[in-house]
Image (cartoon, helix red, strand yellow):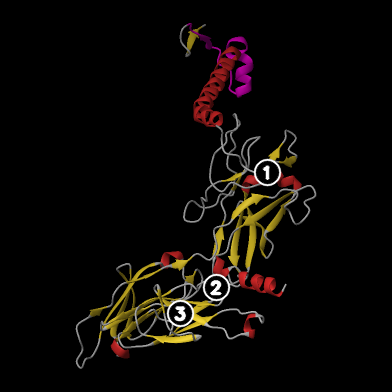
Amino acid sequence: MWALTALLLLATLEKPILSLHPPWTTIFKGERVTLKCDGYHPLLLELQPISTLWYLGHLLLPSHKKSIEVQTPGVYRCQTRGAPVSDPIHLSVSNDWLILQVPYAPVFEGEPLVLRCRGWYDKVVYKLHYYHDGQAVRYFHSSANYTVLQARASDSGRYQCSGTMRIPVESAPMFSAKVAVTVQELFRAPVLRVMGPREARSAALGGVVLRCDTRLHPQKRDTPLQFAFYKYSRAVRRFDWGAEYTVPEPEVEELESYWCEAATATRSVRKRSPWLQLPGPGKCLHTLPDAHPGGQPLSFRKPPVSRSVPSVTSVRNTTSTGLQFTASGAPTAGPPACAPPTPLEQSAGALKPDVDLLLREMQLLKGLLSRMVLELKEPQALRELRGTPETPTSHFAVSPGTPETTPVES
């Protein structure tokens, strides 16, 4: 029993966290930095001394301490007994006069991004410029860090700095090597979907439950998020901790006008979902691609709905549970999942545009024929219906062989 418990504890250990002090991945030749390996060890495992394994690339280092000092460039990892190997840290060593230092830890959306342009062994850098993808973004008279208070995905790219140093007189402008920076996505753009009766946490009596689904980055899974729900451009529920919203029964027929938004508690990162789109009968639910941020503004009017044969658009972000509407408008439970289209459905989908065009042309022809019959049988009633005064000098007759009307003198 004791051995089984020990094995279970070992299996549930998380990989240790490797940190760098100072937190810069590029140093000058001859400098030393400290690597520290922190891991969670249950009391059962601490009955014996915990040893740490250190790796430089695929080479096992001789030290077994919790922290080590290094000055050799390469990829470092650590491992504690029974736990997986840690995430790597890439250490670079430079012999240039000027280096651009970036933090070793990943930077996520909404977090500050700090870049440091450093002269040889901390010499002061004058006329300092920072560049992002070849474009100058900031100028300082002397040494200073460049900080982006709330990083965005657009802040990813290649950075560089330039400046002069007095060695002993002021030098010509010198440039650092370019460094790639990637801002990690904190959470995915949310997707609005309809909840089934068994999935919904709150009972929807006479309504439909919508859920705003997203996924946090594994390293940030403890970050709290808030959710808001909108109908067209109007907020029907402002930011709250709940990810579900119940649409009242009178508004169930307008589900296509709903969308949601997910954000951090400080609103430093906000992302919205696509519009909720309901397909035709017998199909699962889909959502349309986002058309608001960076595109056209939100419309206060509901998009026009075609009165012809309903069509089904195959788009991304399919949901696992659908909702269907009967002729009376009452919601019923849909299929549990979206099944892949069969060859017959694929061939039917290929012919669908031609069938829709043929139906529209037939409807137009039917309306034209009805109007012509009405003009032939009751011209007086037609004029009264249009509200135009009668002109006694002209009547309308249909010439055989042409759809146009020809005036006939009385």
Q: Which of the two labelled residues, at mark 2 and mark 3, occupies the earlier sequence position?
A: 2
Instruction: Identify the amino acid type marked 2.
Output: Lys
Residue 115 lies left or right of residue 261; in this view the side is left
Instruction: Identify the amino acid type marked 3.
Output: Trp
Q: Is 245 in the magenta? A: no
Instruction: Identify the residue position indicated by label 2 in the image.
Output: 15
The residue mark sitting in front, 2 or 1, is 2
Q: Is residue 124 visible?
A: no
Label 2 – label 1 distance at C-alpha: 37 Å
Residues at circles 3 and 1 in contact by the CB criterion of under 8 Å: no
Front residue (pair 25, 47): 47
The residue mark sitting in front, 2 or 3, is 3
Quarter assignment of residue 167:
bottom left
Residues at circles 2 and 3 in contact by the CB criterion of under 8 Å: no
Range shown magenta: 375-400
State the image coordinates of residue 139 (x, y, percent, origin top left): 33, 79
| Tag 2 secondary structure | loop
Crowding near the residue tagged with mark 2, few <14, some 14–19, many ≥20 C-alpha atoms within 10 Å = some
Q: Which of the two labelled residues, at mark 3 and mark 1, occupies the earlier sequence position?
A: 3
Crowding near the residue tagged with mark 1, few <14, some 14–19, many ≥20 C-alpha atoms within 10 Å = few
Q: Image point 75% across, 46% down: which residue?
A: 249
Instruction: Identify the amino acid type marked 1.
Output: Pro
Quarter containing the N terminus: bottom right
State the image coordinates of residue 160 (x, y, percent, origin top left): 31, 74
The residue mark sitting in front, 3 or 1, is 3
Instruction: Identify the residue position indicated by label 3 in the image.
Output: 54
Q: Which of the two labelled residues, at mark 2 and mark 1, occupies the earlier sequence position?
A: 2
